[in-house]
Amino acid sequence: IVVPDEAPLSQPYWLREEPATGIYRVTEPQLIGMPEDPPAIESDLSFLIGGQLFDLSTEPIQVEETAAGEQSRTRLVVIAPISLEFSSNVSLFVPGASRDVKVVATAARAGIGGVLRLDVPEGWRVEPASRAVDFARAGEKAEYTFSVTAPARRGKAAITGSVEVSGRRYAAGHTPIRYDHIPTQLLQPTARIDAVSLDLERRGQRVGYIPGAGDRVAEALTEMGYDVSRIDAAEISAERLAGLDAVVIGIRAFETQDVLESRVPALFDYVAAGGTVVTQYNREDGLEAAPLPMRISRDRVTREDAPVTFLAPDHPVLNTPNEITPADFDGWVQERSVYVPAQWDDAYGPIIAANDPGEEPLNGQLLVAQHGAGYFVYTALVFFRQLPSGVPGAYRLFANLVSLGKE
């Protein structure tokens, strides 16, 4: 069986088009409801049994035996001869400035080459216009660097990569999903990076990040220009925190790192000495932030475009070093907040309120307590969704949180 050159690349049918808000786009209605794509290649088999002819349509399946003696069955998929992946998913630009954008190309077969390009929207510039790629072996990788210049105005743009091979252009990534309990799934999304041109000020330089249930906020902090070091909860001590300008706690870290609760006093000593701790959302059964207690609820604001109200418009977190306005809450994705506190110690000051239509305002979106010479922050706002999505206002507000108390 020879796969035709014009065969479309395999991709779940509900992911072939960019989704609308809250819904996938499917251009072939007859596919809706199917658990997976139709076969990339169909085979028609005929069996003559006892004088009776049986016709069967099927697809090629690769059957392999695993180390445990079980069978692994893999569907035939059509892949790009060269796949592309950007070194990061978001790149921040100073308006009018240039910076390097790196893309990794991977060969799917030996002896293949092509021409690699970055496609940028109007107002953006890229140099060089193209780069030649050439691979001798299947699986070979190479990284290519382009200089991209942002327009003088603020804005967000999608930069896509493509490679032309034998007259056909491919702009696909290659992301296999492998678990023992399901067949291997392959995603080939468009190779893209969100380029964000924005005015972003920050204070401080060294930030510690305590990982939680998994997010890409540490990478976003690095993209903002901070020196980020990951800290396991068991490592928290006065010596380990010394010299850090801020510490950021990942989502649900109090659940994933049981020892973290016992290290809260050390964090508060660090705050009292002038540090800043920013705690992202945790569930109501997973947070004990004594000596400044709060009660986490299951409340959330599900509308990503829900209006926000500034409860403390003069507070530094809304003014320094970036002046935050309601426009910074435009373009948010999926939701505003999750597990919003319902009660909190008087030391906390509520900064922002928001609510879904027809519901009461939730004032615990962002709580800031001054403790000694430093600040302790709890935020239910879903920065872990906004920062990897390149939402400009989320970067500006998060920079203010990390910059609290710094000159």
Image: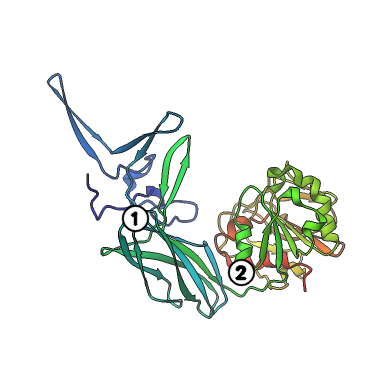
Q: Which residue is mark 1?
A: 80
Q: Which percent across, then down, holds residue 12?
A: 39, 47
**393 and 228: which is toward the camera:** 228
Q: Is residue 334 visible?
A: yes
| Residues packed near mark 2 inside 10 Å, few (<14), some (14 to 19) or many (20 plus) | few
Looking at the image, what colour scheme do you see?
A: rainbow
Amino acid at circle 1: Ala
Q: Which mark is residue 350?
A: none
Task: Please tell me which of labels 2 and 1 falls first in the chain.
Answer: 1
Q: Is residue 394 visible?
A: no
Label 2 residue SS: helix
The quadrant in which residue 168 appears is bottom left
Q: Which residue is mark 2?
A: 327
Residue at point 73%, 70% (across, down):
204
Amino acid at circle 2: Ala
Quadrant where the N terminus is found in the figure: top left
- Cα gap from disc 2 to disc 1, whole angstroms: 40 Å
Q: Residue furthest left?
A: 51
**263 and 137: which is toward the camera:** 137
**139 and 217: which is toward the camera:** 139
In this rendering, would 91 be left or right of 290? left
